[in-house]
Image (cartoon, grey):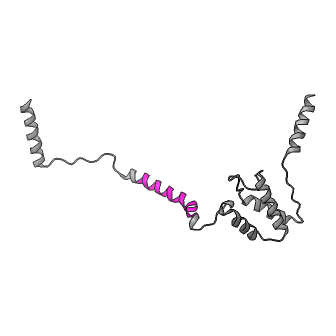
Amino acid sequence: MKKLLMLALFLGAVATANVNIYPFSDQVSEKRFNSLITDLRCPKCQNQNLADSDAPLAKDLKDRVYTMINDGRSDGEILTFMVDRYGDFVLYTPPVKPITWFLWFGPAIILIGVLVIIFARRRKPAVETVQPLSQSEAEQLAELLNKKDTHQ
């Protein structure tokens, strides 16, 4: 009975799995498809590519990529279509342009700034050297100490 229950649960899980099968005429098209859906980010999920996402929007975009590949579109045309519709965010590797400079160079600039601050602090001497009093300063100090002693 226990084995039958386990088998029923397993078959139920397999039956409800969201599997999309895209038949291709050749392996080159299939590799292009897999590469594209891996390189494109799901606009709804934000941290998953189209290949890993189960969102309805991701399924629609995978279907669109599949259709465009079968229509003979190039990878560049497909990526351009997606960027025009969803912006640079849909690309896992955004292009280097003024609006994305901070994404590309910001971490390095921040790291360099932190390192400069750390090394600048290390260069400062921990204890400042004390200069001996000049003759006039020593006399002033002695005079102040004598006044203090006479007032007590």
Q: Is residue 133 above or below residue 8?
A: below
- Kindly indicate the quadrant of the structure image that contains residue 22: bottom right
Compared with 145, 56 (above or below) is below
Q: Quadrant of the N terminus?
A: top right
Return the x and y of residue 78 as percentages of the image width and height.
76, 67
Taking the image as shown, residue 115 lies to the left or right of residue 93, namely left
Q: Is residue 142 above or below residue 23?
A: above
Viewer-side residue, 91 vs 122? 91
Which sits in the foreground, 16 or 115? Answer: 16
In percent of the image, x 70 and y 52: which residue is there? 45
Type of secondary structure dominating the magenta stretch: helix
- The location of residue 66, given as percent across then percent down, is 82, 63
Highlighted range, magenta: 100-119
**What residue is shown at x 80% (from left), y 63% (from top)?**
64
Quadrant for the C terminus in the image: top left
Left or right side of 85 for 150: left
Left or right: residue 49 versus residue 118 is right
